[in-house]
Amino acid sequence: MHEKHGRAMRLNRRQFLVGSGAVLGASVLPASARAQVRRGEIVAGLSERMLTLDPANHYSISSTSVLRHVFDPLVEVTNDSKFVPALAESWHAVNNTTWRFTLRKGVSFHDGSPFNADSVVFTLKRVRDNTKLIKSFVYQDIEDVRKDGDWAVTVSTKRPFGSLPAHLTMLGMLPPGAAGQEDAFFQKPAGTGPFRFVSWTHGDHIVLSANPGYWKPGIPKVEKLTVRFIPELSTRTAALRAGELHVIDRVPPDMVATLKASPGVRVLDIPAIEAQRWHFQLAKEPVKDPRVRKAVSLGIDRNVIIKDLLLGYGRPVVSPIPPGLIGHTSLGQKAYDPERARQILRQAGYQNLSIDFVLMKDLYPKQLEIAQAAAAMLGDVGIKVNIRNLEIATAREQRSAGNYDIFFSGWAHMPHDPDWYLGQWFTKAGAEKLTRFADPRVEQLIAEGRVPDPRVRQQKYEEIQRILWEEEPEIWPYYSVAIYAISDKLRGFEARRDYYVLLYDVSIG
Amino acid sequence: MRSYILRRLWQSAITLVGVSILVFVILRVIPGDPAKMLLPEGAPQSAVEELNRHLGLREPLWVQYGIFLRSVARGDFGQSFQYRSPALRVVVERLPATVQLTLVAMLLTVVVGVSIGIVAAVRQGTGYDYAGTVLAVLGQSLPNFWLGIMLILLFGVTLRWLPTSGFQGWQHLVLPSVTLAAFPTALVARLTRSSLLEILNKDYIRTGRAKGLAERIVILRHALKNATIPVLTVIGLQIGTLLGGAVITESVFAWPGMGKLVVDAIFFRDFPVVQTILILSATVFVLLNLLVDLLYPVLDPRIRYR
């Protein structure tokens, strides 16, 4: 008791001294320097371990978010889903298979080398040509990358690649000097980002320090950023509540009450660009039959799931593509009508149906409870659901082998564009070892939706979704809500819809 | 004695080769595709195949094992699939955290466990004995996970006496080592107590007392030495458990140790890391148990090896 009181008093005195010192100091400094006063350290606690420092060698939302502090991409995306300039000042589609990017001048990498067209050519060719890199398969459609002077780059593609700018928001630019010595480079990587790399302990934490020469004025606002990786939820929240962390991500709904009641902690939530999806095995009886799928859809009360299991932290789905992505539209909400479900099954002659619902263990919050609730609801309409809660790798093997009827999965925006989701899950080749979906109309529309023109894409995607809404190859039970918890010392933190935790324009109060 | 050690070393080598073959084969036979775990969920099958090829997983099993053995002879345990870094480096990075936690937990186990055991045995039937037994039962039945989180909430969040997690200074060691030591301490306490009780009834103890020796000397110098033989066996086994089985404690405390590394690697199908850890752990285990066996003659001159 005495200790807490004493510490509080000491902090107040220190705060006063720092505050008055800052005021005195600020009044003496010239305006430009005043704007750039950086102070303090932010410590973040993320739930997913970062596995690599190479922006081209992972496909993780969390790693993208961390590496964004060290590397700048060509294009950035705002929290209201607008693509805005980063290292590219502007870009446009010259024709259906050609993009042109005009680059920002006066930017340097942390090692002093200049950012220019050579960097872009190197970064893009590298990710396309080195097929060991995780992101490589995305860029196989790139035919050529040519520089047009030092400040412009033309990218030509084998087929229309309208989602290229979106993909590029996840690809940090690398200095061409990394060529031929990549192992050494990634021991101490240099990007153009607001923070410089200091150190990284695999699977534990990464330390970054401010880049004083960052091309955006006034950024970053702190001297040091440490990101700790703490997958265990109770530990992550305890560390925040104990004042050891300033921000944590991936807070599940049932932790919200505890965190709100903790002094010095604020909880922020925002609808996420993520749709849960339970996909059917479309080559397997009985879910091969659209009437069975319809009955399953009618038999699930999605609102109860959102209200009671997600404690309100979910949104009803109105189209497979969530709000925030091109193609989102409104097709109404799916009905809950168990009587009609029973009727459909009776008329179709189905009795004592039994289906397997496969889950990837511990992947999504409350997924087991939600699956159990759905199973109970479906039991009421005469469908017995066997929940198989399998370890992730095994579950995915079972999916490839086709041993499931429904599979609990999800889709978060990556990369802020639906082309990849549709192209993988709703083309015959893509879905072969997944859902076994095959519909030539949809396949044609997906191909047509790859063009750069956003109006054409919107129209094609709306058409695709109308077909999917009718055919119901998947159940989309809800859109997720992203919940973060922060220390009240943090100023300017924005809860993002894409699960990124971006801290370069955040300060410590 | 020398021939005994040599024989044991030779047996250890065969054991380790057997372990490596077993681990190698099991990893490649269980369901789960490393490339699928690295690539995002909807990645095309062609990308999966390409990555598996790069990872060397499309060769016949015996070819893969041959390549593996040749590399291990050079000290190269392969590249971690997850981290794209040499597997040995990834594992060795975790060594300080693991060793520190294991040593401190072991120290607590021996000091606290043996002390409780002695007090309970010497004061058999009294309140001390019952208290010791209750503590031991609690230690063996409270789940690690629960105990760890409770300690974090009490000492980290409410009292703020200790940090909640992470691996930085000596204060960070306190809660995880207490959590990890709870079960083995209880085990050692009970074993010490029963072992000591058995010996306290022996003739030579009665003789020592009859000779007029101080009770403290009787217990500590004569009884304890003999009582520690079974305890030493258990301690040797526990070190193995502590090294690999600390995964729950490591998860709860975000402790960058090898336990969590190996479990994550298994879930991720990161074959090189799993292989490296299992083979290294087996080596340590085998050598430690050899060491324990060699300590027996020191404690009990009746034991001799041929």
Image: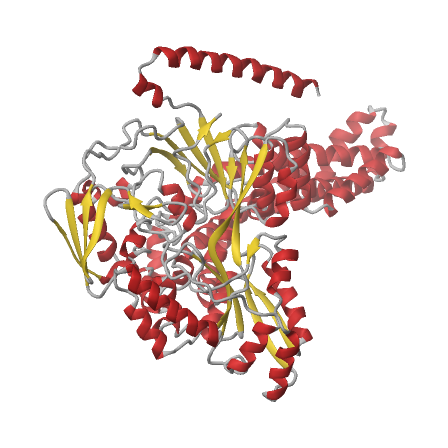
Query: Can I make out residue B104 in this image?
Result: yes
- Judge whether A486 appears above or below A345 on screen: above
User: Between B242 and A335, which is closer to the camera in this rendering?
Assistant: A335
Q: Picture quarter containing residue A349? A: bottom right
| Residue A325 in picture, x, y percent from top left | 39, 56
- Judge whether B293 appears above or below A323 on screen: above
Judging from the image, the colouring scheme is: secondary structure
Q: Total of numbered circles in the picture? A: 0
| Residue B63 in picture, x, y percent from top left | 34, 66
Q: Which residue, as the protein is rendered here, is positioned at the far left?
A: A149
Query: Can I make out residue A132 in this image?
Result: no
Residue at (51, 37) in percent of width and height:
A247
| Residue B172 in picture, x, y percent from top left | 57, 31
- Judge whether A407 appears above or below B156 on screen: below
User: Between A112 and A279, which is closer to the camera in this rendering?
Assistant: A279
User: Between B171 and A321, which is closer to the camera in this rendering?
Assistant: A321
Residue at (66, 57) in percent of width and height:
A308
Q: Which residue, as the protein is rendered here, is positioned at the far right?
A: B125
Residue at (66, 70) in percent of width and height:
A377
**Which quadrant: the N terminus of chain A?**
top right
Residue at (26, 45) in percent of width and height:
A74
Q: Picture quarter containing residue A232? A: top right
| Residue A22 in picture, x, y percent from top left | 43, 15
Q: In the rendered view, does A337 fall on the left or right side of B191?
A: left
